[in-house]
Amino acid sequence: MSLLQQPLELRSVRLDNRIVAAPTATGTAAPDGTATEAGLAYYGRLAGSGVGLAIIEHHAISREGRARLSQYLLDRDEVVEAHRPVTACFKAAGLPVFVQINHAGSAVRDEELRRSEGVRLLAPSPVSHPSLPGVLPQALTQGEIDALPEAYAAAARRAVEAGYDGVEIHACHGYLLSQFLSPLTNIRTDRYGGDILRRARILFEVFEAVRSVVDSDLPVAVRLGAADTLPGEEPRGLTIEESRRVARELASLGVDLLDISGNLCGYDGPGEAWFAPYCRLIRDVAGSVPVVCTGGIRSADAAEMLLRQGICDLVGIGRPLLEVGKRGQGPEERGQTHTIDKESEGRGQAYTFDKMDLFVKCVGLTPMTHRLDPY
Ligand SMILES: Cc1cc2nc3c(=O)[nH]c(=O)nc-3n(C[C@H](O)[C@H](O)[C@H](O)COP(=O)(O)O)c2cc1C
């Protein structure tokens, strides 16, 4: 049997195979942060994709923590009811689903949101975010930092009440916890700044607060930024050696899944499986905690190889499944070439899927080539 088809247990949650639908923002939330018809249709299609686990897009823990106006919210108890139809899509398909929780910090992507009345851009330090040069955030006060673990925990509690099978804390891609991890955006001189264990302190506090409210039979995952630069680049900012220390500490705190991606460098890279070198280094220190590798994995052979080489325990698939969720995977699409739309475009990659059954079921289309223009 292929390793991809091996089941895995995370606390009481059983995954039928090792393919994870990576969290991808769909922009389908209503202004109140709950699911629209389009969102439910998307999740319904994703639930039928044949993956072993779906981790759905980042949900803001507070209105102030939104990256976009079209983002989902877990900011108040009233949204719990509105999340039940989302979890019901996955339950109907028998697919476990985790929800990702996030605070954007200074990485508020929508200009309209940045300019909205009462919106403050918050960050560890008054340093412009690398993707928003010239936009200066305010440093969080001690009191505001003290309130963060409880805010993440409250969002996690709502997620469990809504029926999600697990929660993932977003600590990569340049959002708030990732801003704390990086010495480029965190120049604090108090206990939340300095060496890596101090910069990661807030992540540990958030993890422990979330863990304490999530039922003991349900998993808590962390999506961890491995470094501020891609493998092979000149290290700058957060380094892989530093994130390995964070991973080791999270493992000792009881994290159930380490989902690896980029920190300030984001999620994209060149070639195939660009975070594989980082995943292997993290896996070496993660003990028995399973590691997910995501980014540019486009064939079952490549995915199987990553598992066989001990680089990771699970493979994450982002954009191809975003396409499946958006457009479905009808047989009429087989053999066609598709162009990924603006929101999900990558950097000049051509994607092909091979014919392995599981991958075919997962991505629905074979053979399929995505030709993307560089941006
Ligand atoms: C449109 C889009 C939205 C994304 N939204 C999220 C998100 O909400 N949370 C997250 O951790 N990563 C997000 N990502 C990153 C993906 O989870 C994934 O890491 C990335 O797309 C690389 O994997 P891929 O090459 O298989 O697409 C997003 C990526 C794209 C393209």
Image (tube, rainbow, N blue to C red):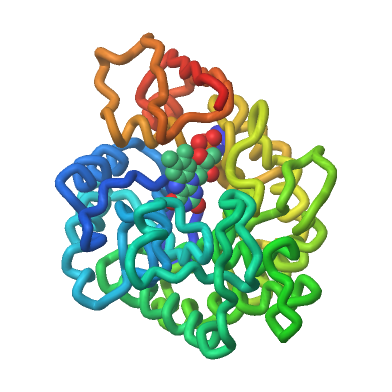
* Along the line of sight, the residue nearer the viewer: 89 or 204: 204
In the figure, is residue 201 to the left or right of 347? right
Q: Position of residue 238 (x, y in %)?
A: 75, 58
Q: Position of residue 3 (x, y in %)?
A: 58, 38
* Along the line of sight, the residue nearer the viewer: 3 or 277: 277
In the figure, is residue 76 to the left or right of 211? left
- What residue lies at 76% left-to-right and 41% top-to-bottom? 231
- What residue lies at 59% left-to-right and 49% top-to-bottom? 131
Q: Is residue 129 above or below residue 342?
A: below
Q: Position of residue 213 (x, y in %)?
A: 41, 82
- What residue lies at 27% left-to-right and 66% top-to-bottom? 163
Q: Looking at the rendering, in which quadrant would you find the C terminus?
A: top right
Q: Is residue 22 visible?
A: no
In the figure, is residue 151 to the left or right of 85? right
Q: Quadrant of residue 366?
A: top left
Q: Is residue 195 above or below residue 300?
A: below
Q: Is residue 130 visible?
A: yes
Q: Is residue 101 above or below residue 349?
A: below
- What residue lies at 29% left-to-right and 25% top-to-bottom? 329
Q: Position of residue 73 (x, y in %)?
A: 31, 64
Q: Looking at the rendering, in which quadrant would you find the N terminus?
A: top right
User: What is the total number of numbered labels drawn onto the structure image?
Assistant: 0
* Along the line of sight, the residue nearer the viewer: 223 or 248: 223
Residue at the outermost right position: 234
